[in-house]
Image (tube, grey):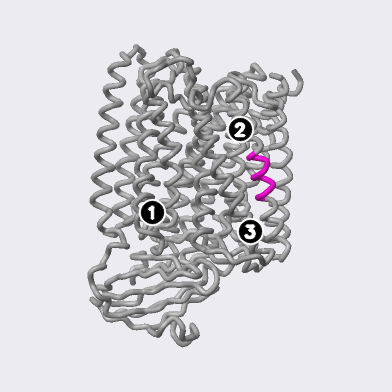
Amino acid sequence: MEQANSRMTALWIYTGLTLFPILILLGIFMRANQGGVITVPADRFFSFLTLHGLGMAGLWFVFGMASNNYLLNKHSASPLVGNIIAYILTLIGVVLLIIATFIGKFAAGWYFLYPLPFYKTWESWATPLFLVSIGVLGVGWLVWTISMLIGILRKYSLPQALAWHYLRGRKEPEVPPFIVVLTATLIGIFICLLAGVTLLSLYFGEYLGWFKNDALLMKNLTFIFGHTLVNEMLYLAVAVLYELYPEFGHRAKWKTTWYVALSWNATFLIVMFAYFHHLYMDFVQPTGFQFIGQIASFLAPIPAAVITIFSVLAYTYRNSMKWNLASLLYFYGVLGWAIGGVAAVLDATIVNNFVLHNTQWVPAHFHTYNLLGQIFFNLAFVVWFAEKVSGTPFSVGLSRSIFALLLLGGWGFVSMFYLSGTFSIPRRFNLYPPDLSMGTTLAKAAAGFAVLYLLGIAFFFFGASKRCARAFSR
Amino acid sequence: MTQQVLVLISFLIVSGALVLVFQMVFFSTKKTNDIAPARVNRYRGLWFLMLGIILGVVFFFTLPRSPYLLFVQERPEKIIVVTAQQFAFTLSDESLDREKTSAEASGGTVLPAGALVEFRVTSRDVNHGFGIYDPEHTIIAQVQAMPGYVNRLRIRFEKPGTYNVLCLEYCGIAHFIMRTSFEVR
């Protein structure tokens, strides 16, 4: 079982590390086109944009699920079949998605905002194929979520797994924070996927001519599905951090306490309402919902900052840490997560959103906590896993090169987004008009920094792939 | 100084503080010793309190300035109906039911400086954005254009000049050329 589990994890890692550079390349093409370095036709540009956005979200979601699935088996076995079904359906979904975007030129963006998919300027078959691909991915991930929840429920009851007994002052049975975070996140994922199923059903209903949908309802469903899923994928990476980070210091592993339990149960609830901040500029949405959006967006980082970020700092302070590639990625990943969070809170303040919504401030903040936060956490897991299965640590030279390239390339890249947002450069433009020529200059620099990040990932792939291969030869 | 620059400065100050704290903690691992859990919990409590107060203050000071509450007690002096459609805007002071072509209306709108203007923004097809750029090319206001709904944006233009309107919601492959302008005199 342990061997099969390792092989499945290695398979996910190979698939992910192959797709990631391709998706980065699409991003570089887009920024280089915006910078006037190369020319990508508009229809291609927007199909790249669609695949890049969806591909990255999907890739790091499954990476988070795969690493959690691997670690969950140390506590309680989850059915392997769930992992296998998810892998097969993910592959099928990705192939269909690539066909819809690359060949069919489907270009409605990652969030295919209703009713844009029906106003097609691409192949007519690409829209239903795209919706089917999302459906296939959703079914695979729903099965996987249930399979992991089964694994948890084999050992703990649901209230125990959510650590409710800690809130009542009891500490038995002992539940590791990893299980608490993972359970709360999986339930959240289950809810978003159900919203996704509803959204797709409504699309198909209209496609078949049964009814006409309401644009505001569809917008709400799109964001509760997409935005919340992206939030949850971050928490998947944080669950792994809770489990692995203490391995790099000499102090005892973290234990669940009442405030850890309260924090993650609260986060699970709060995050369900934060998506309203995507609808601030829809003034017809009831004003109360807009205010709930700002309240939830302000409350969501409090548990994260007070519990996780503070705990990482407190754990590290004056601790004899073993600094290697994995622990550095974790530590500085927490910094990236925190800074991305600050930028997100600023944008989620309604008065700021009034002048920042759909400018490049938005990709700035999510690229910060994804590229320099959550992806660092996931890469740290890969290093930990690769070293564990191979017994060979990453060399100091390779580790330093990877880390320097990722930091320099990543921070340089997101800085260009922040500056663009500050100078009112809109997002999702393939070319900038002469009155916004600053966007062109910044895009050119961003493409250069992204190349450095890509180089870091190429080195990483080299280091991780040969070590992960040992999972198959053992 | 624009609001965007203020946001950037706030962001840089907080991020700079975070970088300093992380670097200090990183270098502290050279000198190791244990810290009492009670002390850690005390700091955690203080941190929680401080963060809660900061966010609470920001919340209560910014909410009344939100666009839904701006100028609600006043009567607009000028009403402009904005109809967005792939890939152009129609600006008109006629009712929504009257058909007007974009060629006839766009570029020809003149608004009085200092007057309260209400834009009634809707879409005939997909979601669009209605982002107003001032003569210095800085966004000063925006609202979404959504099919089936009318979003009302109230704004007072103090500065005379040419204001550009850009579509800020991705609406299809010619999204980047969707724009119009009006004059404030």
The image shows residue B20, relative to residue B3, as above or below, that is: above
In magenta stretch: residue A139: yes
In magenta stretch: residue A355: no
Secondary structure of the residue carrying numbered label 2: helix
Which badge, 2 or 1, is on the more N-terminal residue? 1
Q: Which residue carries the number 2 mark?
A: A460
C-alpha gap between disc 2 and disc 3: 28 Å
Q: Amino acid at mark 2?
A: Phe
**Toward which corner of the image does residue A379 lie, by quadrant?**
top right
Q: Are marks 2 and 3 in contact (CB under 8 Å)?
A: no
Q: Are marks 2 and 1 on the same chain?
A: yes
Q: Which residue carries the number 3 mark?
A: A47
Q: Are marks 1 and 3 on the same chain?
A: yes
The image shows residue A467, relative to residue B140, as above or below, that is: above
Q: Position of residue A292 (x, y in %)?
A: 36, 49
Q: Position of residue A204 (x, y in %)?
A: 66, 59
Q: Amino acid at mark 3?
A: Ser
Task: Tell me the crowding category of disc 1: few under 14, some 14 to 19, or many 20 or more residues within 10 angstroms, Cα based.
Answer: some
Secondary structure of the residue carrying numbered label 1: helix
Q: Are marks 2 and 1 in contact (CB under 8 Å)?
A: no
C-alpha gap between disc 2 and disc 1: 44 Å
Which badge, 1 or 3, is on the more N-terminal residue? 3
Tag nearer the camera, 2 or 3: 3
Q: Which residue carries the number 1 mark?
A: A289
Q: Chain of mark 2?
A: A
Q: Amino acid at mark 1?
A: Phe
- Prevailing secondary structure of the magenta residues: helix
Which badge, 2 or 3, is on the more N-terminal residue? 3
Q: Which residues are magenta?
A: A134-142
